[in-house]
Image (cartoon, grey):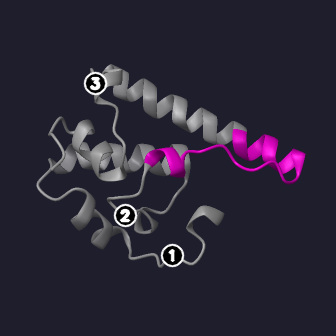
Amino acid sequence: MARFQGRTDIGRDRALADLAAGLPPAQVSELTELLDIELGIPLGLLRGDDRLDVILAPFPLGNPFSWLWAEGALEDGISEINYQLKLRGVTLERRPETVRDLFAVWCRKPAA
């Protein structure tokens, strides 16, 4: 959670109002559950323009034992999200760049 240090948690409802405006609630719910399970990042810390490559970047080494656990969990979560996107027919050319893009692609709606 060091990546979000200093950021205010705006809460789930406010975050969803920004991230999922106009998207199907059932699909949004699926994605939010997946993100919660796989990444453990509170939705209220995410912003629509957060870049996925930054959020999902490997952790700095620091303590090798804690790094091994944290990095393994992150890589497992990323793999599951990528697998679920593949099941939804998302190709590499359409890979999302931001959190807002991820919601749009998950719900099969082009990001604005």
- Which-is-in-front pick, marks 3 and 1? 1
Magenta range is 52-71
Label 1 secondary element: loop
Residue beneath disc 2: 47
Question: In the displayed structure, would residue 23 be above or below residue 73?
Answer: below
Q: Position of residue 48 (x, y in %)?
A: 32, 59
Along the line of sight, the residue nearer the viewer: 76 or 61: 61
The residue shown at (71%, 37%) is 72
- Count the marks: how many? 3
Specify the quadrant of the image occupied by residue 96.
Answer: top left
Task: State the separation of the CA atoms marked 3 and 1.
Answer: 32 Å
Residue furthest to the left: 22
Residue beneath disc 3: 88
Neighbour tally class for label 3: few under 14, some 14-19, many 20 plus, Cα within 10 Å: few
Q: Amino acid at mark 2?
A: Arg
Q: Amino acid at mark 3?
A: Arg
Q: Which sits earlier in the primary sequence, circle 1 or circle 2?
A: 1
